[in-house]
Amino acid sequence: SIPKLYEAFHGCFDIGAAVNPRTIAQSGDLIANHYNSLTAENEMKFERLHPWENSYTFEAADKIVDYAREHGKKLRGHTLVWHNQAPDWLFQDGEGGPVSGETLLARLKLHVDTVVRRYQGDIYAWDVVNEAIADEGPELLRSSPWLDIAGPGFIAKAFEFAHEADPKALLFYNDYNESHPQKRDKIYELLKSLLSQGVPVHGIGLQAHWNLFDPGLDEIRAAIEKYASLGLVLHLTEMDLSLFRFDDVRADLTAPPEELLELQARKYEAVFNLLREYKDVIDSVTFWGAADDYTWLDNFPVRGRKNWPLLFDENHQPKRSFWRVVDGR
Ligand code: XIL
């Protein structure tokens, strides 16, 4: 018989999945059986919840919250501040020019108040700020309307607003390339500075969009150690293990080659053995999807390229990655 994935990690960390209306419909049993934490893949992003200044669209997000409640799943909130999937009106004044920094922060406060209060008691952790750090170059922060209009203070403000709205929620800074040395050091610097200013931030989200080659285990370990040294809780928030390097053009595969599935199983096993070592600082590991029949990595970033990055195959059966992860020690 097939063990429940999250039960295999009982006493270590929660095991989550990103879900959306489609995967709840087509993978509901799998999700209910194997994951004890959920994240809305898109439905709680700014443009989805708040497409126009004076109206909110909560229906899809509410359904995910109801599903989590009915099935007794924990829920992570994703995400309050991001440069992607944010509506144009947010950064514009009535004439289509840029808003003032003051207005942008006032809009942020209203949004955060409304959303965080609505889901208070259901959502226990929020990705408050997503991907604010620059990948390359000497700059700490990525250029974005948030930074360009409101200045670097938008980050601290977002955490303060979220904390005011729900003092019990755990508040996370979330980012990708989080195990690359340069970005790791920048994330560390940002968080250290927020903590020294007394900003209410409680954790770091490591997106963990990884592939067979990159990052290496030593880099993952170094990132975990460095972040943990700040005394923060760590969540892996969007894990998947792509079979391909980021922009490898292998658009022709219709089934995953056996040798790549074997390499994937080995890497998953090694990664989870490492994560188990850090169970005292890692409280949650969420996959960015439930099974290989639907993953955001299909067509991204290479159009026409199918991917198989998760622990369950397209028929919702456990892959060899699943067995290595569950049996590993
Ligand atoms: C992705 C979703 O999976 C896609 O469906 C959507 O088209 C784009 O966003 N980092 C994040 C997530 O923080 O919100 C992203 O989710 C994946 C990368």
Image: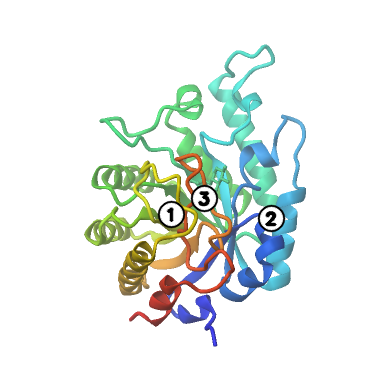
Q: Circle 3 is placed at which residue position?
A: 127
User: Marks 3 and 2: in contact by CB < 8 Å?
Assistant: no
Q: Which residue does the image show at 57% across and 30% down from the upper left?
A: 105
Residue marked by disc 1: 205
Residue type for callout 2:
Arg
The residue that appears at 67% across and 46% down in the rendered structure is: 115
Q: Amino acid at mark 1?
A: Gly
Disc with the residue nearer the chain's start (3 vs 1): 3
Q: Quick one: quadrant of the C terminus?
A: bottom left
Q: How far across and down, in percent of the image, does residue 133 sit?
A: 38, 38
In this picture, is 231 found above or below 276?
Answer: above
Instruction: Tell me whether the residue at label 3 lies in contact with that at label 1, contact meaning CB atoms closer than 8 angstroms.
Output: yes
- Under circle 1, the secondary element is strand
- Residue 140, by quadrant, is top left
Residue 178 appears in the figure: yes
Classify residue 31 as left or right of residue 135. Answer: right
Q: In the rendered image, which residue does mark 2 sit on?
A: 22
- Residue 197: image quadrant is top left
Q: Secondary structure at mark 2?
A: helix
The residue under the point 74% across, 54% down is 62
157 with respect to 217 (left or right): right
